[in-house]
Structures are given as C-alpha cells and as structure tokens.
Amino acid sequence: MINGEILKQAVISGANNISRQKNSINDLNIFPVPDGDTGTNMSMTVMAAVRALEEYDGSNAGEAAGIVASAMLRGARGNSGVITSLIFRGFAQGLKDMEEVNGKNLAAALGIGVDAAYKAVMKPTEGTILTVARMAYEAGVEAAKEDNSAVFVWQNICDKANDALAITPELLPVLKKAGVVDAGGKGLCVIFEGMLSVIKDGIVVEYDETSEVTVDNFDSAAAEFDEEINFTYCTEFIVGRNPEEETDPQLLREYLETIGDCVVVVSDEEIIKVHVHTEEPGNALSKGLEFGQLLSTKVENMKEQHKNVKKSKSGEKEVFKPAEPVEDIGFVAVAAGEGLKNLFKDLGCTNVVSGGQSMNPSTDDIFAAVMATPAKNVIVLPNNKNIILAAEQTVPLVKDRNVIIVPTRTIPQGMTAMLNYDPEISPESNAQLMMDSTQSVGTGLVTFAARNSEFGGKKIKEGDIIALENGKLTITEKSAVKAVIKLAKDMVSRDTSFITLIYGEDISEEEANKAYEELRDKFGSRTDISLVKGDQPVYYFILSVE
C-alpha cells in the first residue's frame, strides 16, 4: 500500500528523474525551429509540485495527490506540461479521501487523468504522450486483476509506457522519418520510472543541480529593453468617418509618419483606427479631426512606463497585483519582447504576460495576469499554439470573473483579433468575432534552425536561417532580410491590404529599414505596409499579411 509520504517521495523522484534527462528529451524535438522544449516544460511543471510538497509532512495519499495536482496545474507550461498536469489531476480525483492506495486505485486514478488529457486536446493524435499514457493505464488495469499490489501494477504501467513509446514512430510517420520517439511520451516514461524507484525500492532518484530549471533562468531568455525611447507619447484614437465625405486614410498615415513612428492606421467604411508614437499627440489628434469625429482617444507617457521595465532588468520579476473586477471587459495577451508587449498594450490589453516561442508561461502566470485585470469579463490571447492549453486551464481557477480564451496561435493573429474588437457586442460574441478575424491573416516567421534536420529532401544545418509560412517551413537562406523578402513574395496576393513587418532583438535598425524599403518598393503601391520594432527573441522577423 502507498500512503501520502510514499507518494510524496515518488513524485519528487519522478521530478528529479526528468530534471536529469530533460536535455536528452529536448533533443527529441524533430522540427528545427526553436520551440518550447518538451523536457524543459515537463520538468518545470513537475518541479512545481516538488516545491509545494516541501512543507507537507502528512501520510494521507489523497491529500498528497491533491497538493501535487494543484501545484502542477498552476505550474504547467507548454502542451506537454499541461497534459502531464491533467494526468496528475486525475490522480488527485481518483485518490481523494484515501489514506492508503493499492495498485487498482493507482490504475483507476491514472485512467481519470488520461480521459481528461484526451478531452483537453481538440484533435487528439496517437503516437504522442496521449498514447503512452492511455496504453500504460490499460496495462495497469489488467495488471491489477492479476496482482493488486502497488509495486506490481506500477511496474506494469512503466513497462507498457515504454512499449507504447517504442511504437510512436509507427503511429506518427514524421517521427519514423526522423528516427526518434515522441518527446512528450518519453518525458512521461521518465517521470513514471522515477516514481517506480520509490514505490518498488524506496529509493529517490537524486536531484541533479547542474540541470536545474528555474523560472529565473527560463525567463532570462526573453529580450530585455534598455534603449532610448525616441518618442514620449503613445497616442491612439478612433475617428468616425463622415459617410458624405470621401477621405483617404493614407493621407493621415503619411502625416503621422512625419511626426512619429510605429504608425498603424486601419480603416473601414465607418471608422479609422490610429496608433502612433510621437512628441506631438495634440497635432496627431488635430489631424485626425480632419477625417471625422474623434470617437475615443488614449495618450500614455511611454517614458514613465519604461521606468517599470528597468526594474525588471535588475532581476525583479514582473508582479501582477490583483484588481477588483469593476470594468465590463479587459484583455490579457502573451508576448515576448518589450516592443510587442507595448504594442499589445497600445491595442488595449491591460496586462501582457512575458512569454512565447521557447518561453512558455505557466498557467499560474496567466492566472495572475487575469486576476490583475479589473474586468468582469477577461479575454485572453495566448498568441502561440503551445500556450493555448495552459491558458485554458485558468478558466476553472477564476471564480469572480468570466474568462474567455480566444485561441490565437501567432502574434499577428493576436494583433488582428484586438483590432477587430467591437465594444458594442457581448464578450462572447466578441470572442467569436475576434477569432473569425484571424482567418484572414497570414503569419510569416524568420528564425534560425535549432538543430540539424531534413525537410522536403533538403538538409538543414543548425544555425541556418529558415522561414515559415503559416507554420510550414518553406525557405532556407543565409540572410534574415533575404528570407523575409522571399517570404513576403510567397505570401502577398492581389487581395492583400496590410503588411506589418515586426523585427526582433537581433535585427539592427538598418537591416529592418532595408527590408521595409524593399517591401515598399515591391508592394507599396497597392498595400499598406508598417514597420514595428518588436524586440522579440527567437524570431528575426514576424510578418503579418492580411
């Protein structure tokens, strides 16, 4: 029988085991793009449970499982981390109120977690961590019929998990082609094996300090912003157009470019929505009046905002302070890089969580930002496919406000969603409208190959410049500027109205302007083109085409 103390030590052992092996699990990622790193995400998720268990000295298995589930839910990072947390949440549900548990109890509890994990994924794919968990659970149920001891059942669970892992390449051709097994499935096997060491032999796998994963060194990968702000005031306004007068918003845009930067002008038949950084907010608003009535305005001092950013450079992690839900609606977005963070705030987001590709925030990070948003309805934009599941786990955690996840998968989708918000309709209708609007935006990404690989019969070397069109690798180049120009040529069509070029922390202003000018020469006569300094890590350029 297993009591709370044994279960506690088993979870600690499982966490230590994946901490030791996280890098080899990361190496199983087959796509060359820098990603969330499965081993790192899973390690951080389970380590959250270890920290929560430090003060627990009870012997109730149900209590220990509950502590583990709560901590892992809040600490979950990336899809693999969220799925792992759901499996352990099933443990907590299945073992609730049990002082001691046997093999049958363990298998049944695992089954609850497997069921929750499958339901959490919109389109479950076999050959992944889901397959490994499901087959392990099924083996545990059969083993319990033969021998109900915890040791026998968990041994069979581990053995079958490894058997399932071995066949993942047969279920997913992309794994077979790369000659690897599924990374998430491998991580789950490693956690289960670490637990078995305690359940079977009473030995806790030793923690490897050299492979320690912490929130601090995880977040340090994000770019920090510490350069002179060229313009003080972030100015936004919406102009209601006079239907009896024909006005060209391009003329407003051209004027704003003479008095500031980061100019965005979006229009339809009824309104013109404007964003600009300038020293002359009054002049910007006055010019706007020439095109119609001002429906809303917002002017913020970016230098004052920057003081708070500098605090984080000294090692202080951004802290979200809880706020009472007094407003009707608010927004939370996820983005990495101060330029992108400020852009989403300019678009109306109250809080922006630091994170993105290779830096997945935890459920607790997103939860804190939601609770710091003073609104009865909070719409969350994950802006990355590997963050959507973690964001969705915040919904049941929040009791005093309505949380709606708009599952944006990229930064351009998030930007388009915010630009299409309609204050005249309900939060639920807005969520649908915002998501529908993302269908018209294409996302181009220019980054570097994180590992050697082969795609489309072409060998890719670590460090090569690569470009992706809506998630599909299409281009390899020696220059990021050349790559983004080629990418734009592939993505822009006759129907394209807007192009936004966002450049990252590793791109100089000179390189960004060169790419911008080439795009203007190629498409400027028929397309509105904007250049934005995003400061994002990982991606040299993010290209939004709609």
Image (cartoon, helix red, strand yellow):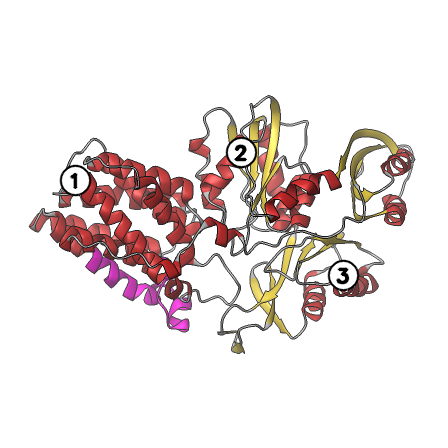
Q: Decide which of tag 3 and tag 1 comes sooner along the chain.
A: 1
Dot 2, how many residues are within 10 Å of its Cα: few (below 14), some (14-19), or many (20+)? many
Q: Which quarter of the image is occupied by the N terminus? A: top left
Amino acid of disc 2: Val
In the image, 542: left or right of 203? right
> x%, y% of residue 247?
90, 40
Above or below, 486 relative to 303: below
Amino acid of disc 1: Asn
Give the total of numbered labels: 3
Q: Which mark is residue 370?
A: 2
In the image, 40: left or right of 512? left
Q: Residue furthest front?
A: 314
Residue 423 found in image quarter? top right
Element under label 3?
helix
Q: Give the distance between the C-alpha atoms of the residues marked 3 and 1, in whole angstroms.
A: 60 Å
Q: What kind of secondary structure does the magenta stretch mostly adopt?
A: helix
Residue sitting at x 56%, y 23% = 325
> x%, y% of residue 351?
60, 37
- Residue 514 in view (yes/no): yes
Q: Nearer the viewer, mark 3 or mark 2?
A: 3
Above or below, 398 relative to 88: above
Element under label 1?
loop
Residue highlighted by disc 1: 3
Where are the magenta residues, as a range? 158-184
Residue highlighted by disc 3: 509
Q: Decide which of tag 2 and tag 1 comes sooner along the chain.
A: 1
Residue 159 found in image quarter? bottom left
